[in-house]
Amino acid sequence: MKVNIGIKEKDTQAMAEVLNKLVADLNVLYTKVRNAHWNVEGPDFHAQHLFFEGLYGELAETIDEVAERVRAIGHYAIGSLREFLDLTQLTEDKPSKNDSKGYIKLLLNDYESIIISLRESVDLAEKHGDDATEDFLIGIMEGFEKTAWMLRSHLK
């Protein structure tokens, strides 16, 4: 059934593309955080193991919310590893050692890259007249900025 929410089809299509790119980025980031959770070593292992577990839990919720937003505006969310890798801006790099500092540096870079993309996506949502997606993306951006601050604080 056609979605009738007061936004033109071409505009919801443009926003679905933006949101699906975010789904891809978040899934790649989720996998990288799980890897850090499983493989971190060092004297701070326990604390970092729990910290990474919290991060991937938050990411799992965000992934679901973004995919559901794609559906709410009348499109299909991507869901395959190939699609994630084709659309993501992130790389599958790993730290040279399995210490928390190495993982955190890589993850911080990814969080900041996604924040920059989110800012651009907020502007696109405004351009396409999708106030709900604009507000939704701002909320995600705020959460990512807080996480980036926490990651940076670990590196001091």
Image (cartoon, rainbow, N blue to C red):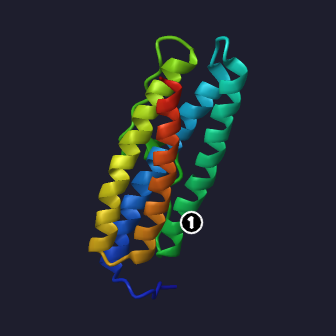
Q: Position of residue 134 (x, y in %)?
A: 40, 69
Asked whether, in this view, residue 149 is left or right of residue 68, the answer is left
Q: Quadrant of residue 61?
A: bottom right
- Secondary element under disc 1, as helix, strand or loop, is helix
- Say whether residue 28 is visible: no
Q: Residue at x 34, y 50 (%)?
A: 117
The count of marks equals 1
Dot 1 alpha-carbon crowd within 10 angstroms: few under 14, some 14 to 19, many 20 or more: some
- Say whether residue 139 is visible: yes
Q: Position of residue 13 (x, y in %)?
A: 36, 71
Q: Position of residue 121 (x, y in %)?
A: 34, 60
Q: Residue at x 43, y 53 (%)?
A: 22
Asked whether, in this view, residue 88 is left or right of residue 41, the answer is left
Q: 110 or 74, which is in the foreground?
A: 110
In the depicted structure, whether residue 54 falls above or below residue 9: above
Q: Amino acid at mark 1?
A: Glu
- Which residue extends farthest left? 127
The residue that disc 1 covers is 68
In the depicted structure, whether residue 28 falls above or below residue 104: below
